[in-house]
Image (tube, rainbow, N blue to C red):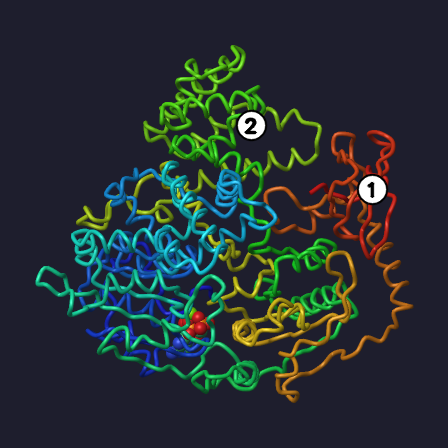
Amino acid sequence: MSIIPGLEAFAAPTPSAPRRGPSPEELLDGLNEPQRAAVVHEGAPLLVVAGAGSGKTRVLTRRIAWLISQRGAHPGSILAITFTNKAAAEMKERVAELVGGRAKIMWVSTFHSACVRILRKEVDKLGYKSNFTIYDAQDQKRLMTLVCHDLDLDPKRYQPQQVLNWVSDQKNELRDPDDAAKDAKNGVEETYAKAYSLYQRRLAQANAFDFDDLIMVTVHLLREFPEVRETWRRRFRHVLVDEYQDTNHAQYALVAELCADNPENLDGERVPGAELMVVGDADQSIYAFRGANIRNILDFEQDFPNAGSILLEQNYRSTQTILSAANTVIDNNKGRKPKRLWSDAGDGEKIVGYVADDEHDEARFVSDEIDRLVDGGGLASEVAVFYRTNAQSRVFEEIFIRTGQPYKVVGGVRFYERREVRDALAYLRALANPDDQVSLRRIINTPKRGIGDRAIAAINLLAERESITFWTALTRASEAPGLATRSFTQIKAFVDMMEELQSMVAGGERADVILESVLDRSGYLAELESSEDPQDASRVDNLAELVAVAREFADNPLAAPSADPLDEEDGDTEPPAGTLDDFLERVALVADSDQIPEDGDGVVTLMTLHTAKGLEFPVVFLTGLEDGVFPHSRTLGDTQELEEERRLAYVGITRARERLYISRAVVRSAWGAPMHNPASRFIDELPVDLIDWKRTAPEQTSWNRQSQWGDRAERGGAFAGFNAPTAAGRRAFSSAALKADTAKRAKTSGEIPSLEPGDRVTHQIFGLGTVVTVEGVAEKSVASIDFGSEGVKRLLLRYAPVEKL
Ligand code: ATP
Ligand code: MG
């Protein structure tokens, strides 16, 4: 598996051999004619449009190497946009093999990371401090909930998430609150615009940006401050963008600010635009719901006058069978430019199809096939399992755990969304930026230290009365009206602790050292360690993992952004050793696909189709091909949305190099009820003669499927004592670890989950359930749990593989 295509050709120089620049022939080796033309192109903006697997990313990588080694470009003058931090890191590493340490100052990053770096340097011009916090989805929601509450909005009519989606659309279109208010079409939008306005003010007070702000604010900055724009135009002489079809308007505008030579603005002062190359495939545009605009690619030649374009038609990734399948499916989209991808890799294997009785049967099929592949000498790491939505991963996880097949879920309930991880990060963020109210409020009484709602209200009053920040008010708590003496003492202790920790930050202490001090000094770790709740043990593990992440970050200079690229003349200076700010920035910008396992880890990769963009695997399972699942039920009535789903199918199919499996389940439980979904229309769109159906119709009636459920439960019983994989993310499980865990069987009293009626749980076999009653205590406690279609089960908690959610 090659995550970053196009790099294999560059062998790393042996450490002892003196580095010699590659010759032009070497740089162009393994490229076809149009690919070479794109690599060596000079001057006008260039669009490389091509179908999947035609070497777009390879061209982009080679071009960077070409620019540096053949055209004398300074690595610091290159800005390359990729969609994942992982892709960026690998690209940089390989360019480093080519040109040495100078590669480090090259900017290869996502749009978001690039904007953060620009903002850290320039944002003081907008009245922000450079230590701003980046709010993620959960922070945004908290803040918007506060805003809606303060505006007295009816929570039934105005759900924070809905308002946020609307605000996000505005930002992607570069509309600030004033624009939004002006353009509001009705009362609801007027209210949204009001919420947007207050939300932005609160963000500013907290010295924070949300994700969409990063791009919008950078564009505004470049537009409002011509001298800033010229500085950055002078710096970036080459801009390269991968996956251009998924850029939204704000991202497009950013590229244009850096690259476009609009004659109207050319007033002599203006630095000529950077050389631009974008690569993309309109058929793979899958982010319209995040504002991606396919027009950006279709209109490229209009947007950038005198632009050239290059078409790549040979696919080097997949067999002809896989390609033909992809071509016929995407042909069903209207109004696209037809293109014919071809491959000379030969027809290869037929696509293998399987119709399962239910989702468990489907997972079993996938698992059995993987076993067969591995028995036949294949590697589990060559296999990827794709599905439409995150929740579908669970059945695959269950079977992989049972069979001891190591796996990794990419995305899903992410490590960084876990409560304890977020608490720890909130501490760090509050230390790095005391104005960050959302973080500060999250931790002020976590762990419980007797600073209750009334005390916080008193502090709030003081902050409002004196027009000071929440943090400053805490430091002046003695002036807070009506604050109880006890609360004052607690607040004082909290402030003392925070100030001590802040002094470590100010001293430039490493992120991992600060994190450990936080966990220790705050009492957070001690509380978890002394807890009886088994969940807390895995929380401790997760925090250990976070410390390890911080340590690794502080140790690994390549992963860290370089200190001050503008001032660096010579690329051989080491980047900083992972300060707290760098670490927080890194964490805030983690992308799902950054968690993709390394080659050779022997693990099967599970991910949603969206995350699979740009990747390739020898073997791909495309699962859940049912109308209502994929295409998603929400899209069934809407031609445009259906077309986007079809593009997603095209992305999925074209990830496969050698073998493609497609499967669907006749019955699938959703929200606890069985659903009978018809076959996906995308299956009907595949050429019949390319598919070898292993099973077409379920053999069993619903009557004997019942007995099958029983059978499954029984088999599951053998694993009754197995603990669910919560600790430290859902990483690979070795079969040895599995056996050891299974041997433990019964839990000790400390591990028995304490459940109450109404709690949501997940069970290894029965899936999600809701606790109805609990009887008995400790070792004897028995819970009745409603597992929806699986019925209500009475379980002795000491043995049952249940986990509280
Ligand atoms: P996607 O649209 O999925 O992002 P892409 O157009 O970026 O695909 P790449 O990922 O760059 O395509 O290339 C696909 C595969 O083909 C990679 O394994 C790459 O190494 C290989 N490849 C690209 N060009 C050539 C070539 N000229 N000769 C041999 N192999 C090639
Ligand atoms: Mg690519």
Q: Nearer the viewer, residue 287 or 188?
A: 188
Q: Is residue 186 above or below residue 583?
A: below
Q: Is residue 158 above or below residue 576?
A: below
Q: Which mark is residue 772?
A: 1
Characterize the local packing of mark 1: few (<14), some (14-19) or many (20 or more) Cα atoms within 10 angstroms: some
Picture quarter with ligand 2:
bottom left
Q: Is residue 710 above or below residue 28?
A: above
Please tell me in which quadrant of the rendered image residue 263 appears.
bottom left
Secondary structure under badge 2? loop
Identify the residue at horizontal 30%, vertical 63% (top origin): 253
Disc 2 residue type (three-letter): Thr
Q: Earlier in the sequence, mark 2 or mark 1?
A: 2
Q: Check disc 2 and report the residue beneath it.
A: 446
Q: Is mark 1 within 8 Å of ligand 1?
A: no
> Measured from the top left, where is residue 626 in percent x and y?
68, 72
Disc 1 residue type (three-letter): Val
Q: Nearer the viewer, residue 615 or 170?
A: 170
Farthest bottom residue?
Answer: 689
Q: Nearer the viewer, residue 304 or 202?
A: 202
> Measured from the top left, where is residue 615 in percent x and y?
49, 66
> Measured from the top left, where is residue 579 in percent x and y?
36, 37
Farthest top residue?
Answer: 485
